[in-house]
Image (tube, grey):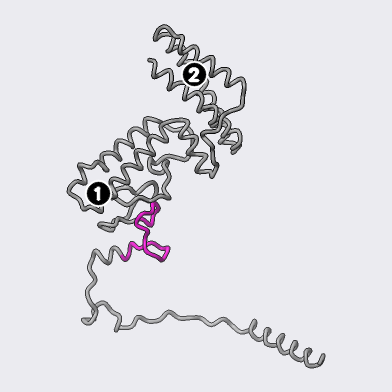
Amino acid sequence: MWNRRKHLLLSSLSLLRHISSTPLLRLHPLKPSPLLSPSNSFLPPIDSQLRNNLLDLPRCGFPRNLSSSNSCSSCWNCGAVGPTSGAFLACGSCGAVQPVDSSVDYFQIFGMKKMYEIEEGDLEGIYKDWQKKLHPDLVHSKSEKEKGFAAEQSARVIDAYRTLKNPLSRALYLLKLEQIHVDEEKTVSDPDLLMEMMEMREAVEEAKDTQSLYEIQSKVKKKLDSWSNSFKEALNKQDFDSAVNCTQRMKYYERALEEITKKL
């Protein structure tokens, strides 16, 4: 038995030496067959638009997702390639409204980085541009399919705008993107904060003029801004427990501002 195994082992080693010493075969490129030449009459002519579409196919090897926001997006109506980054809500070539892509977050819709600090002026400008492109008057003569796309896209843009414009809702949305759940109905058990809120409500109720309300409003805004900055720092450090704590306090100050606004 041992001799047989030894013989098999030696045979295998000999075969491996032979393979390693054998030069690699060189594969020469095949010469094109005359039968495959485009000049042959039996081949149908290729439309120029079709040829361009074929040449423009993504390298990923499968058809583009019509609702995707990456470089593999294309218009469902004319086939034009969408933007390489950002949201693909409406086609730049034919103006057709595209179906909603739920994988595109609110920051991508407005072409912004996913961060807490944003330029509200930029947000406002881009929002108005989207509203012009998705306005019902522009699609009233379109098909029911495109009207449906426009209604869905417009509703999503409005929700995205309102979410990102408000510091608290923007903070909560960023935590949501990080898969952090925040119970917005949870009350804070901090006695100092609760006492401060009670005193603030009393001051608002007892305010005799508008000037007094503006002074209280200014103080509350400073408190809200302070916790807003604390949230930004916690998020940058990925200290999500502290970030959640900040949003809970921001909620109290925002409600206080709403009460003051009602009396103004």
Q: Name the residue carrying label 1.
A: 147
Looking at the rendering, which quadrant does residue 198 occupy?
top right
Identify the magenta region: 54-73
Look at 39% across and 48% down and name the residue there.
85
Identify the amino acid type marked 2: Val
The label shown at residue 81 is none
Amino acid carrying mark 1 in the image: Lys
- Residue farthest to the left, as pictured: 141
Q: What residue is shown at x 58% (from left), y 21% (from top)? A: 193
Residue 66 highlighted magenta (yes or no) = yes
Q: Secondary structure at mark 2?
A: helix
Looking at the image, residue 75 lies above or below residue 164: below
**Would you call the spot at circle 1 few (<14 residues within 10 Å), some (14-19), or many (20 or more)?**
some
181 or 78, which lies in front? 181
Q: Nearer the viewer, residue 241 or 235?
A: 241
Q: Are marks 1 and 2 in contact (CB under 8 Å)?
A: no
Residue 12 drawn at (x, y percent): 70, 87
Q: How many marks?
A: 2
Q: Which quadrant would the C terminus be assigned to in this image?
A: top left
Point out the residue furthest to the right here: 2
Depth order, front residue of 261/75 = 261
**Residue 65: x %, y % from top left:** 37, 58
Query: Which part of the image, by quadrant, shows the N terminus?
Result: bottom right
Could you classify mark 2 by the number of other residues whose Cα lies within 10 Å: few (under 14), some (14-19), or many (20 or more)? many
x, y percentage for residue 35?
29, 84
Q: State the residue position of label 2.
A: 220
For marks 1 and 2, give the CA distance: 44 Å
22 relative position to 200: left or right: right
